[in-house]
Amino acid sequence: MSPLSTYNDLYQHLASTDLEPWIEPLQATVEPAILESNNGHLERWLGAIDALPQVEPSASSLSSPAIQIGRPQDITTEQRVTLPDTLHHFRPWRKGPFDFFGTHIDTEWRSDWKWDRLLPGISPLKDRLVLDIGCGSGYHCWRMAGEGARLALGTDPFLLYIMQYLAVRKYLKEPPVWVLPFGIEGLPPAIPAFDTVFSMGILYHRRSPFDHLYELRNFLRPGGELVLETIIVDGPHGYSLVPDQYYAKMKNVWFIPTVDTLVQWITRCRFRDIEVVDVSTTTTDEQRSTEWMIFESLSDFLDPTDPSKTIEGYPAPKRAVITAQAP
Ligand SMILES: C[S@@+](CC[C@H](N)C(=O)[O-])C[C@H]1O[C@@H](n2cnc3c(N)ncnc32)[C@H](O)[C@@H]1O
């Protein structure tokens, strides 16, 4: 069965929600976004999903730090030997961790740390319709389902991350988790139907942060919750840093506000009850190169003589999590 058949289950699931008008546009766009992507790796990735062991996992967990799929004894000794090579096809693994039948995927990011910081500060996800914009591999979407979300719908334009999601989905077929192969601009016209919308690690990549905040609001039902996570800097009220060109070797960073400025932006977009849930400096224990992400990581983006600065001399990344309610 094609791994893409999971999207048929999504359409069935949407039929029982206020997102029913999304079914037709998604039916028309999801498969072509993957199969007609002209990505030279697509065939290899789909082959690797097919080559993953055809077994039912005897156990799984969406609530442990690593999304757990099966146990080592579910697969043969030979399969245990070849599994890491098959999973290497989906490198770089950035957001996780995951555990496939005892093969631990130590991703670049300890995404579970972000989850642990934000979870106590957000409205319980039980029975909620949740949208996660720029969800990467979908790691946090699985955790949302672990909290009882009625739907955890992620979206990310980077095809490799969709393949990572589909590799997990091969085994975890039941949870209401789907990742769409689009940027936010590829989604069907917004319906104010979601109970919670996450935007994590996205705002600083947007040229117009206000437009992004308004876009997010359009997906929320009245009183629905925005969970926003972004890089911040210290500085006076109203200040935001616009890097000359690169920030921590990223060239697509536009606005990095102070926490106060961010609260002001969100207020100007007419959200209510704004709460700062967490402010943390990103450490080289949380973001680092591993066997599963062999390229440069945070320690390479910081000044080797002063890790409180980026290599360009800007303040090193600190991140804030903020919640706000849609009017
Ligand atoms: C910094 S990562 C954040 C991943 C995840 N939300 C997290 O917090 O761990 C940013 C993600 O946004 C995705 N992205 C890039 N352009 C996007 C767009 N136009 N719409 C939605 N997501 C986008 C990238 O592919 C990447 O996975």
Image (cartoon, helix red, strand yellow):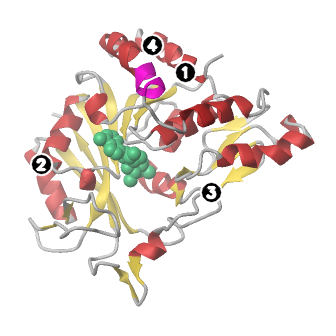
Distance CA(mark 2)–CA(mark 1): 40 Å
Kindly indicate whether the residue at mark 4 contacts the one at mark 2 (C-beta within 8 angstroms). Answer: no
Identify the residue position indicated by label 3 in the image.
Answer: 292
**Which one is earlier in the sequence, the residue at label 2 or at label 3?**
2
- Residue at image location 43% in from the left, 25% down from the top: 36
x and y, in percent, of residue 310 in the image: 34, 77
Q: Earlier in the sequence, mark 4 or mark 3?
A: 4
Question: If you read the primary sequence from the N terminus, does the residue marked by circle 3 or circle 1 appear first?
Answer: 1
CA–CA distance between discs 3 and 1? Answer: 25 Å
Q: Main secondary structure of the magenta part?
A: helix
Which quadrant holds the N terminus?
top right
Asked if the stretch drawn in magenta spans residue 31, the answer is: yes
* Quadrant of the rendered image containing residue 21: top left
Q: SS class of the residue under badge 1?
A: helix
Q: Dots 2 and 1: beta carbons under 8 Å?
A: no
State the quadrant of the C terminus: top left
Residue 291 falls left or right of residue 102: left
Q: Are marks 4 and 1 in contact (CB under 8 Å)?
A: no
Q: At which x and y percent is residue 248?
A: 34, 70
Which numbered tag is attached to residue 11? 4
Amino acid type assigned to the residue bearing label 2 in the image: Thr
| 167 is higher (above) or lower (below) than 150 | below
Task: Answer yes or no: is residue 271 visible.
Answer: no
Q: Tell me the CA gap for discs 2 and 4.
A: 35 Å
Instruction: Tell me the tag on residue 267.
Output: 2
Residue receiving disc 1: 4
- 4 vs 1, front mark: 1
